Amino acid sequence: MTAVDEARAALGRIGVGLVTPIAPADEWRRAAQRVERAGYGSIWVNEAIGGREVFTQLSVMLAATERIVLGSAVANLWARHPATMQGAASVLADAYPGRLALGVGVSMGAIVEQSGQKWTSPLTRMREYLDGMDAAVDAAPVPEKPFPRLLAALGPKMQELARDRADGALPAAMPVEHTRQARERLGDDKLLIAMQSAILETDPAKARGIARGTQMLAIPGSPYVRSLKSLGYGDEALSGGGSDEVIDACFIWGDETAIAKRVQEHLDAGADHVCVTVFTPDLSSAADHFERLGPRPALTTVPATRLPSAAQGLKPVPPDRRVGFLPGGTWATTTDRSGLSGLNRTSCSPAARPGPRPARSRTDLKRPQPCTAQVALRGPAQRGPARVTPRGRHPRARTGSAGADQAGFVGGYDQLGAVAGVEFGQQVADVGLHGGGAQVEVLG
């Protein structure tokens, strides 16, 4: 699998950003563990130049957790030599296979100048820096699983560089339309991770006041201002901390339902993953917010280790939170419709995206291919067994079930709760649904 494939399988759909500047290591460990238990797929941390160094910070949280992906959003390229960036990421990816995502960014002119360095063209600097990283690959460890290299890319030229020289992009604090345009520039084979700030406040004046307090648009040479202008926002709308329209487009505020709705809009616009950050005074408070927003006990299906090369005729996940449908060769998630977990959608691995039916030889059509579908109930609060029943044309089907006290490692996820599986032979049918499907239901 490529780094993009590995990341898509491991990240899931929603992660969190922990951006508290300074805190004791034990507080970072406890916050990371609480986020992992809440069911999120990733944790992202940032850095400036000096202070909280990002790779050291990531190593603390990787050691304190078991399955969650840790990412830099971003590692500041002005803070280290490109060979050091490549080496540090490679060491962590080797130590924690499949659990590191590397986001690299050019920072801002004011921050760079304050560090005593000379600010230069962001695009040129990034291109030269990537050259240096590539030249250092042979001297670095070779991880068991490749880690994705992502660029903090707001503008079209940086996004094109992310498409050509990296595994994807990490745009931050942008409207949904920006996500849609970024996906068009990147193409379907690159990762797009949207970074979004959420404000759990239903009073419009208070919420917008918190958003304006970030001074995002007031920073000299702000890249956010340039990107928003490219989306059609004028000087008047961008002055004074931003008009209500700008604030409402760039920040998510409201109750859990409102925040879940905006997250879903970014996913629908083409984001593979949405990272949500919150404004809190400390890490404990941030973890409180994420537990309040986070995935409730969820019915989740994940890719098996031996999937067919394509799956067509995908069917939507039923709206009932207690039932899920797994088309052959795909994975899907259905959860209760509250908080950030209320994202009812069907997804599939990159190799199984909907599209023209692939040409197959006569031999392929006649020979059934084994395929295993694994299903798990995630969430420590979930109780009760699960049952998996084959559907479609499965000549050699077998059902399986498990109690809620069992756990399993399935498709790159450490699943909590009940795990059940069904193994069946694949038969290509005229409907074009390779591998058929499985009806999954929670019992009791």
Image (spheres, rainbow, N blue to C red):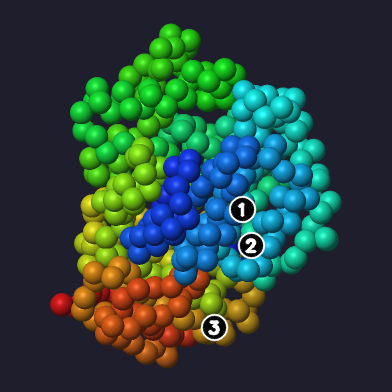
Residue 285 x %, y % = 31, 47
Q: Which tag, 2 or 1, sits closer to the chain's start?
A: 1
Q: Quadrant of residue 379?
A: bottom left
Task: Please tell me whether mark 1 or mark 3 is closer to you in this view.
Answer: 1
Residue 76 higher or lower than 314, as above or below: above
Residue 299 x %, y % = 30, 68
Q: Is residue 117 left or right of residue 268?
A: right
Helix, strand or loop under label 2:
helix
Residue placed most toward the observer, 226 or 35: 35
Query: Disc 1, disc 3: CB below 8 Å?
Result: no
Question: Which residue does the numbered mark 3 point to in the structure image?
Answer: 369
Q: Which tag, 2 or 3, sits closer to the chain's start?
A: 2
Residue 354 x %, y % = 50, 57
Q: Is residue 435 left or right of residue 189?
A: left
Point 61% across, 53% down: residue: 55
Query: Disc 2, disc 1: CB below 8 Å?
Result: yes
Question: Which residue does the numbered mark 1 point to in the structure image?
Answer: 55
Amino acid residing under circle 3 = Gln
Q: Which tag, 1 or 3, sits closer to the chain's start?
A: 1
The tag on residue 244 is none
Question: Which residue does the numbered mark 2 point to in the structure image?
Answer: 92
Q: State the residue lying farthest toward the top.
A: 236
Residue placed most toward the observer, 61 or 398: 61
Q: CA distance from mark 1 to mark 3?
A: 43 Å
Point 38% across, 22% down: residue: 212
Amino acid residing under circle 1 = Phe
Amino acid residing under circle 2 = Leu
